[in-house]
């Protein structure tokens, strides 16, 4: 048997060192490098064809007929939308999110939805007892749901139990950081344990056809804890987002081998658990009142879904040498660029003022198409002049001040019309391919210095 070797592994990024270090040079984390034992399993291999246990692999072509794996709807429409249509047999799904955001609640409701259709679903918890899971299920009104529950942390015991009985439709592991293998000489939650445990569980899913859903802890930066290879091993990576004090929750896919990435599902946290929000645009702008300066409605796209959100800005006098710039729900570096362009290309005196930006509803906007809506909110607050009522805005801003066209303009405008908006401020050359409603006003601008003309 190979002699165990000592190595030092960063628990944040998985970097391996020959000796201990207080700071990881790869990710910059302090006190994240710990000692682990690994077996020197690699040796020189020769005369492979003569080795025992070697078998010839099966090679096939794309033109050969095969059984295509289909999507199985879970019964939760927003979750099915993010997954690309439903759970795929033999797939591995990794779900990450902040503590208390609702990951366990969502998966318990998912298990109940699958069990209600007569299919077996196994919920394995490594963080709570069976009694605690039953208490949560009772609070959610799922106390009589035929869900199979177990409390275990040994991957070996879990796999042995599942192989003895019939394969379930889905297996939920809450969480992967609590699982361990006896053959790995390190504590649960370490890089080696997380990587090895996930490999064994996903390998079982591929062989049995059960969908494997793994809950992952996140670091203080919002990334899933453990080695990055964990996200490469699974088929789908989902992030559960949302402000702790806000009732809305966003389920976002950042990787999906069976559907579109960056798709989102919107939920609302209630006393009875998570409820689906079928029309999130109406909720994100429901509290928006007309004739208010510093507020604009952005027509965005999240995955394939059009989404209207309110962007609020406040420009205030500053008594500091360096005025503050604070952002919630957007990129602060992009805000700095927009402020610089407004000051240089549109003559806006903002350099000596504090700027606060907020995306209402707890949503995080990442696409550059929000540039024009952000600039409009800042200009509106700076001059204390409200934008015209029932107006949506979208467009990308370049460093020279030009307003550029963005993709999916028709989808954005259709969503705005469906919700009763009658005006749109868009980049020059945005021509809808469909016939707009009578009375719908389309204002096209090619430079941000024309933005002042669009204010009331």
Image (cartoon, helix red, strand yellow):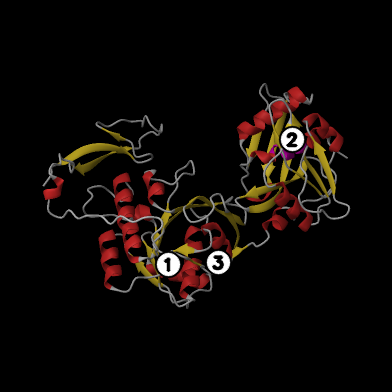
Nearer the observer, disc 3 or disc 1?
A: 3
Q: Which residue matches tag 1?
A: 132
Residue under pointer 2: 375
Quadrant of residue 26 within the rendered picture: top left
Where the C terminus falls, by quadrant?
A: top right
Of the numbered discs 2 and 1, the one sitting upstream in the chain is: 1
Q: In this view, does 109 lie to the left or right of 400?
A: left
* Pointer 3 or 1: first along the chain: 3
Does the rendering let one see residue 111?
A: yes
**In the image, residue 223 lies at what x, y percent?**
46, 44
Q: How far apart are marks 3 and 1 (CA)?
A: 24 Å
Q: What stretch is highlighted in magenta?
A: 371-377
56 vs 430, nearest the viewer: 56
Per the image, label 2 sits on a secondary structure element best described as helix
Kindly identify the residue that appears in the image at 56 percent across and 49 percent down: 262
Q: Does the magenta stretch include residue 197?
A: no
Residue 143's disc is none
Q: Residues within 10 Å of mark 3 (few under 14, many from 20)?
A: some
Residue 42: percent from left, percent from top: 18, 41
How far is mark 2 from mark 3, CA to CA?
Answer: 37 Å
In primary-sequence order, the first of circles 2 and 3 is: 3
Direction from residue 328 to residue 317 in the image, left or right: right
Secondary structure mostly seen in the magenta stretch: helix
**Disc number placed over residue 76 in the picture, else none:** 3
């Amino acid at each position: 048997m190979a002699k165990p070797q000592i190595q030092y592994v960063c628990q944040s990024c998985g970097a391996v060192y020959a000796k201990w270090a207080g700071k990881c040079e790869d990710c910059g984390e302090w006190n994240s490098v710990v000692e682990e034992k690994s077996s020197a399993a690699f040796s020189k291999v020769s005369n492979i064809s003569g080795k025992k246990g070697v078998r010839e692999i099966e090679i096939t072509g794309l033109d050969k007929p095969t059984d295509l794996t289909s999507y199985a709807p879970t019964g939760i429409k927003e979750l099915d939308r993010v997954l690309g249509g439903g759970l795929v047999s033999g797939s591995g799904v990794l779900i990450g999110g902040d503590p208390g955001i609702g990951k366990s609640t969502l998966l318990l409701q998912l298990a109940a939805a699958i069990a209600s259709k007569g299919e077996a679903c196994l919920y394995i918890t490594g963080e709570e007892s069976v009694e605690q899971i039953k208490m949560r299920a009772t609070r959610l009104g799922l106390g009589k749901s035929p869900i199979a529950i177990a409390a275990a942390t040994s991957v070996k015991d879990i796999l042995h139990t599942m192989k003895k009985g019939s394969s379930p439709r889905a297996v939920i592991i809450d969480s992967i950081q609590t699982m361990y293998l006896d053959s790995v000489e390190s504590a649960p939650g370490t890089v080696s344990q997380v990587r090895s445990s996930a490999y064994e569980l996903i390998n079982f899913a591929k062989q049995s056809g059960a969908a494997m859903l793994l809950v992952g802890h996140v670091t203080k930066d919002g990334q899933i804890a453990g080695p990055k290879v964990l996200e490469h091993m699974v088929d789908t990576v989902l992030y559960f987002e949302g402000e702790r004090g806000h009732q809305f929750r966003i389920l976002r896919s950042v990787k999906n081998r069976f559907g579109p990435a960056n798709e989102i599902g919107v939920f609302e946290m209630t006393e009875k658990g998570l409820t689906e929000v079928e029309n999130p645009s109406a909720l994100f702008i429901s509290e928006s009142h007309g004739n208010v300066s510093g507020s604009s409605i952005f027509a965005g796209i999240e995955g394939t879904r059009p989404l209207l959100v309110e962007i609020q800005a406040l420009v205030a006098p500053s008594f500091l040498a360096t005025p503050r710039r604070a952002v919630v729900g957007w990129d602060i570096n992009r805000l700095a660029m927009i402020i610089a362009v407004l000051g240089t290309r549109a003559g806006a005196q903002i350099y000596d003022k504090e700027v606060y930006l907020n995306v209402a509803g707890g949503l995080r906007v990442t696409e550059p198409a929000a540039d024009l809506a952000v600039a409009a909110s800042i200009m509106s607050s700076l001059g204390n002049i409200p934008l015209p009522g029932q107006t949506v805005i979208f467009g990308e801003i370049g460093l020279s001040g030009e307003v550029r066209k963005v993709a999916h303009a028709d989808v954005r405008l259709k969503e705005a019309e469906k919700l009763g908006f009658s005006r749109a401020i868009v980049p020059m050359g945005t021509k809808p391919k469909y016939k707009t409603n009578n009375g719908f006003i389309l204002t096209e601008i090619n430079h941000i210095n024309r933005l002042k003309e669009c204010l009331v």
